[in-house]
Amino acid sequence: MQVKREGNGIRRWLHGSGLSETMALTLILWLCSLVLIGLIVLPLFGPGIAGMVAVVLLAAFLVMCWGICVYRLPGNGGQH
């Protein structure tokens, strides 16, 4: 008979709060935006500006992700 292990406290907290899904969605959104940056910004402004836009966009997505995660505090079920 196998015993299912739940993992450590951080994994249970992340799984219960939905934060890991929010971070994964943020990363996927940023990766998809890199294609648009490569197609639009890179030919018009060059690699330096395209790299800067990519980093700024990543920072903006992470700030939005952090805001979503703070708004959905664990324990309140994400409902306001």
Image (cartoon, helix red, strand yellow):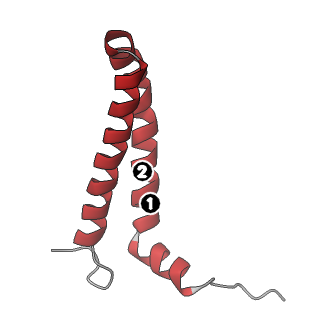
| Disc number placed over residue 40 in the picture, else none | none
Q: Quadrant of residue 39?
A: top left
Observer-nearest of 32 and 79: 32
Question: Type of residue at label 2?
Answer: Leu
Task: State the residue position of label 1.
Answer: 21
> Are discs 2 and 1 less than 8 Å apart at CB?
yes
Residue 20 position within the rendered picture, expressed as x and y whole percent measured from the top left: 46, 64
Which type of secondary structure does the marked residue at label 1 adopt?
Answer: helix
Q: Quadrant of residue 36?
A: top left
| Residue 73 rendering spot, x and y as whole percentages | 28, 77
Q: SS for tag 2? A: helix
Query: Counting other residues with Cα less than 10 Å from the Cα at mark 2, is it few (<14), some (14-19), or many (20 or more)?
Result: some
Q: Which residue is denoted by mark 2 in the rendering?
A: 25
- The residue nearer to you, when weighing 1 against 15, is 15
25 lies above or below 11 = above
User: x%, y% of residue 54?
Assistant: 38, 34
- Residue 79 at x, y = what percent? 21, 74
